[in-house]
Every structure is written in structure tokens, then in C-alpha cells.
Amino acid sequence: MRLVSAPAAVAVGSSAAAALGVLMLIVPPRTGRPGGAAAQRFFAAGALLVTLSTIAGLAGTAALAPRWTQHDRMLLASVVAVGFGLGALVLSLALLALPGVTRNSGCVLRHLLDALVIAAALWFVVWVLVSRPTRLLGDATPAACPALLVPGVVAAVAIGVAAVVGMRCSGPRHRLLLLGGGVVWVALAGVGLGLGICRGREPVALGAAAATGVGLLVVAVARRAPRGDGGFDGDVIRRGTAYAFVPMIAMAVAGMYHVLREGEFTAVGIAAGSVEGFALVARQYLALLDVRAYARRLAEREAHFRRLAHTDPLTGLANRRALLNELERATAAGSPCVLVTLDLDGFKTVNDMRGHDVGDAVLTEVGRRLRAEPRPGDVTARLGGDEFAVLLNGATPAEAQRTADGLLAVLSAPYPAAGGPEVRLSVSVGMAYSAGTPDVPTLLRNADLALRYAKQRGKNRVEQYDSEYDQQWRRRTTIEHELRGAVERGELHLAFQPVVAVPSVRPVGAEALLRWRHPELGYVRPDEFIPLAEQSGQIATLGAWVLDEACRQLSLWLADGHDVWVSVNVSPLELHAPEYALRVAEALRAHQVPPQRLVLEVTEHAVATDLDELIRRLRALRATGVRIALDDFGAGYSSLGQLRNLPIDILKIDHSLVAEQEPATAPAPGRRAFAPMVDIVMRLGHQLGLEVIAEGVTNQAELAVVVEAGCRFGQGALFGWGVPAEHLEAMLDAATSLRPAQIPAPRPRRRALPAAPSPVADCTVPPQVEDQMPARHAQHMGSVDSAREMRQA
């Protein structure tokens, strides 16, 4: 068989049309439709496979035409049929991938089963018509071409898919029918191309190739056309059952006709009937699942209406009674669960400052966020006020932690408020697990205890219940109880941390630190019992004992000839007590201690309270002759203006300023250590007439930094921790035994600094600064510098 010019032109034109269609399908339209990327890829891939199969068939026909045999034709027809069948199948899947046709994978499976029902019936009817005894095509029946089975089956499936998609469309179907018709046309063209190659009929093959190009162009044009079809109805129940009855009726009629004509049922016919039956059974099984899903949703709605009596009216969440019922049910069933309790931090301020309407709006928004966050099957409830709870059924510890962290993040987001700025709140979260919990009240208690610890540890955090919480709570209660008699039982003692002159490291003073050793509890940390003392109102008793004991020990050292001073920490609660100044004066008088030897340390945190009241209290204390030190300077509470107005004598630099400066390492040879912040604080202190002590000096590098900045006194682990009085006394004895010649001279400063005020000489301060300073210079400062190094400086 020889190709002439006309067939060649047809082949070239068909290939060009097919290539143009592929190009139009590969390049997406400029007005992209959301969700159509998958369909675009399927259309492009299917068109490319079909075009390559067409070109391969035409090229093979042209190459083998002069000498091809029946075996060559069958082989070429099989290759073209498989490629064409795959391409047409991909194009059919592209119809299912169109936006809105399917909602999920289950919907895709239902559509495919519907299409398979139609395809099997159509294949059976065609088989009856072309097989014996009917033989509708007569001698043209391709009985010797088994390769046509693949494109024939795919063509039937394409017809079924196009029919199902068209039936699911609820609006105008023009564009959709054009797409489906083009895909079916291409699939049928594949059957014709395979038939022409298999039977050696060149006109049939060329006509099928031309039809392929036209079909691809139709699909491409329809794909790029403006979308004019309506939406798709995904409800597979309301769209009727004609897709099942019509194919079955057609198969029954065709089968009866075949029997009446005394036809035989070959494997092809039996296979088509079996596929039809299995597809219908599978489709009905999916329908049964749909009915069960509807019944389940109906039961859930009924249960929802029954729970209306157990719902919080403001937030729509479950109330306390409903939560208790769920907890009882989970406990009775023995299923593991996690109870998460939440409390809004600072919500009372919102009600007081913004009104209850804004507060109710915030609570409603909290309920909305809680409903959207937990997993299916979990129970969210409002326990009352601003306290909420979430019951996580069957959650693992990791899942519960992730859920709690998610709740913390969601509820900490700003809350919009009508007619005003948005409301910002934090939330504290406590978690308790049902495992090992005997009953519901214990589970609630554990969750509340975890929530309490979350609030005590800074709020805006998640705390999981631990059995240690009970021990800690009992220990807390025991400490609070035992602390009341600690003074009478003699369980308290003082430790003294030395304050040294630098760089000679000679002790010149000490800070009195309270310590408690209980006979049963053992050593109790100050950060554990001092906050409890403040909360329970016992801080005044402890402070009075510390003041009296520190003055007693100081009087002994002074009597032994030691030139030393002692500082005592003062709680803000003590400081604001009206009788505290009288208590200080009485302690000084009772132990015959010179007032200038006692230093009262006020933390920088106390400056955050009422500043005017603080200044009045400090002036009253300074009137007794004692000196005032501002502790932890640099922690972030006091400003320069407050520092200028505070009646203080000593400034203690916080460890953070000393440790975090650059460089914080030993200076290189020929290079001096320098810390800008320490240097600035030193200059500021000297200009205000204050002595400066560097706290928290832990290594030689930090010591070099503070010495280079001009600081003359240091305190920290480098010079010693808090030690008993007799140990510090030994240090004082050792320092006193040194001759003056053994004491190193002070290190020269890095650069010229303004002359620091001498403690024994008259302090010279610029007039513009002196006018703004309180009357602190009237007090003699010489007693601060008790050691010889300080007087020499």
C-alpha cells in the first residue's frame, strides 16, 4: 500500500490539528479558574498521548505500506490501540477533574461506577449487534482484530463518563457537552484508527486521524471557552436513578434479542454482563453507606437538641453539668481522656474598665474559638465566669499537649471590641489525665491545681498536672504553717555575703541573707518561703527578726574593732508599713549601732509601686541616720528621673549589666577592658553623689570591667557566697592583719573621668544637678567608706 499525495496531505493536516489542540490544552488560559489545575494537567497529558499514538500509526503505515504483513499490521494496531486507549482514558478522567464535578475521592468513585454501568451496558449492546448471528457490520466486522478491545472499552467508558458528568450538571450544559462530545469523538477515532491499521484500509486510518485532530481542537476550544455551565450537584441521591435503570433495560432487551436469534454468549458478552452486575452491586453498597451517613447525622442532630438543656446560653458551649455528665460517662466506660481547664488572665479588668457588654462579647468570641479548635468528639464547656474547660476524649499526651498549646495561641490573639480598641488577654491552661484518677471530683481537682500553678508561675502558659503538685501543695501549706513558729524555735539564721573593695578584694561590708533550716523539711530556699511570708502576712515578723539579728551581729563586729557595715534587704510590704522607721530606730538603739553602719536595701521592683509614697518612706528612714541602697539597678523598673528624685545613698548595679557587656572577657595584652553600660552607670552615680557597688561579679573578666569603669566596691561569687557570721569574722580578721604596704594600690582608670565625690571630703556636684537633687548631701557619707582603701580613694 503506497501513500499518495492526498493521503499524505491528510496525514500532515491531521497531525498539525492534533498538535495545535495539544498546544492549546497545555497552555492554560489567561483567565484561570480556581481548582482547574488538575483538569488542565489531565487534558494536556491525554491529548499528548493521543497525538503521539496518531503520529505513530500514520508513520508506521507509511513506512510499512510497501511490504507489511498481517503480523506487522496486528503489532502496529496493538501499539496504537494501547496508546490511544490510555490517552482517551486520561481525557475521560479530566472530565471528572473539572472544578465542582466531584467533592472528594468518594464522589469520584461513585461517578466512575455510574460510568462503568453505562459503559458495560453499551459494550454488551454493541457486542450483540456485531457478533453472530446479527453481524450488523457484515464482512467489515473486525473479528480478527483483538487489539480493538482496548480502544473500544475506553470509548464506552468515555461515553459513560460524559453522560454522568452531563447529568450532574444543574445548569446550562453547552460547554460541558462540547467537552464530553470532543472526548467521546477522540475515543471513537481511536477505534477507527486501530481498525484501519488492522484491516489494512488506508482511507479508514486517514479519516480516523483527521477525526482525532478535529476532536482535540473541539476539546481545546471548549476548554478555553468562557464558563457558561451551571454548578454541579454533588448529592448523588437527589439526582435520580436513571443511570442504573436505563442501562439494565438496554442489556435485558439486547440479551433477549440475542437469545431469540439463537446467538451464543461468548466470553466477551459474559464479561460485559459480569462487569455490569458488579458495578451495580458496588454502587448500591456506596448508596447504603450514604444512607447510613445521613442516619448518623440525623442522630447527631437529635442528640444536639437533647443537649440544649446542658448548654451555656452566652457562648453556646456545654455548661458545667454537661461536662460532668461527659466525665461520668467516660469514667464509667474506662476510656482515657484529658481534662484541660482554661482561665482568662485579667478578665475582671475588662469588665471593670470596658463594661460587661464588652466582656460578654469577649466571652462569646472565646466560645467561638474553642468550638473551632478541638478535635472531633471533644467537649468544650464554660464552667462559669471566665473559666472554661475542654474534655479531650481518647487523646494521647502528645495530642493533648499540642491541643493545649493551640488553645493557648488561639485564645491569646486580640479580641475585637465594638466602639473601642481591641482587647488583649492572656490565658492560663491546666491539664489533668484520667489515668490513675479514681473519680471525677479528683480529676477536676487535679486540673484546677494545674491551672493554679500555671497562674503562679507567670500566667500565659500550659501546666500539666503532676503528682508532685500535691506534694508541693502540701509542702507549701506546711511551710506556711511552720514559718509562723520558726523564729520562736530558733530555726532561722543569717548568712553574710561580703562586699569588698576592689581591686584589693578587702572586705568592707556584708549583706545579711535570711536562711531557714527546718528539722523535718530540711533547708528551705528563701525564694520559696519569703513569697509565702509576704502572701500570708508574716513578712513583718521575719523582717523584724532579720533587722534585730543583723544589728546584734554588727555591734559585735564593731566592738571587736572591725571597720565594717551591714546591709539588710527590705520588702516593699515592710517599707510601706508606717511603723517600720520606728522599728529601725529601736533596733539601732537596742544594740548601740551607729546608724551610718546600717544600710537598708530596697529592690528596684519597689520603685514600680507608688513613687511618692516610696519617697516619703525612704526620707523617714534616712532621718534615722541609716543609709539607703537601691538594689538590682538595671533590671528595668527605675528611670533616670526617678533615680534623681529618690533619697538614696548607694547604687548597686544589677548583675545583668556587668555580665552581658561586651567585651565580657579578660582584656588582651595592651588593651583595657571596657563596658559602656557599667561606665555610664558609674558616671551617673558619681554625678548624683552616690556610691556604686557592682553585684554578681563571678570571674576575673567581670572584675576587670568594673575596676576599669571606676567602681570601687564589688559583691558576688568571686569574693564569696553567703557564709555564717564566724566565717566572715575570720575574713575580717585576716584583712585587718594586713599591713597597709601589702594592699595593692588602686588601678589607674582607662581614661580621664570627672572627679568622683570623695566619701570623706565635701561632695562637689555641678549646680544644675544640685538644684534637681533631693537634700541627700546634708548627711555625712564618710561612714560608707569603712575600709582604708575607701578612705584613700
Image (spheres, rainbow, N blue to C red):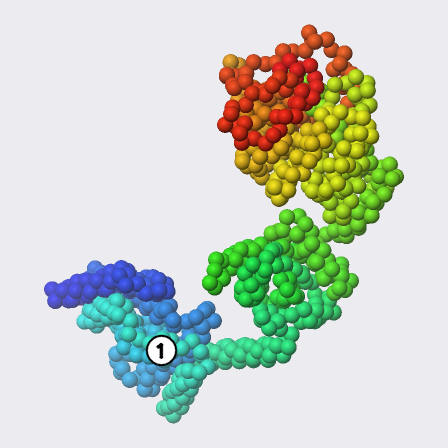
Quarter that holds the C terminus: top right
User: In this picture, is 308 found above or below 610?
Assistant: below
Quarter that holds the N terminus: bottom left
Pinpoint residue 692: horizontal percent, then vertical percent: 61, 25
Q: Is residue 215 left or right of residue 333?
A: left
* In front of the other: 664 or 122: 664
Residue at 67% x, 55% y: name it: 451
* In front of the other: 548 or 315: 548
Q: Is residue 86 left or right of residue 294?
A: left
User: In this picture, is 103 found above or below 574?
Assistant: below
Pinpoint residue 582: horizontal percent, then vertical percent: 76, 37
Residue placed under numbered mark 1 in the picture = 169
Residue at 50% x, 27% y: name it: 768
Asked where in the image residue 337 lies, by quadrant, the reply is bottom right
User: In this picture, is 581 found above or below 783?
Assistant: below
Q: Is residue 661 left or right of residue 729?
A: left
What residue type is disc 1 on?
Answer: Cys
User: In this picture, is 133 found above or below 332?
Assistant: below
State how many labels appear. 1
Residue at 80% x, 29% y: name it: 589
Pinpoint residue 36: horizontal percent, then vertical percent: 35, 65
Asked where in the image residue 143 lies, by quadrant, the reply is bottom left
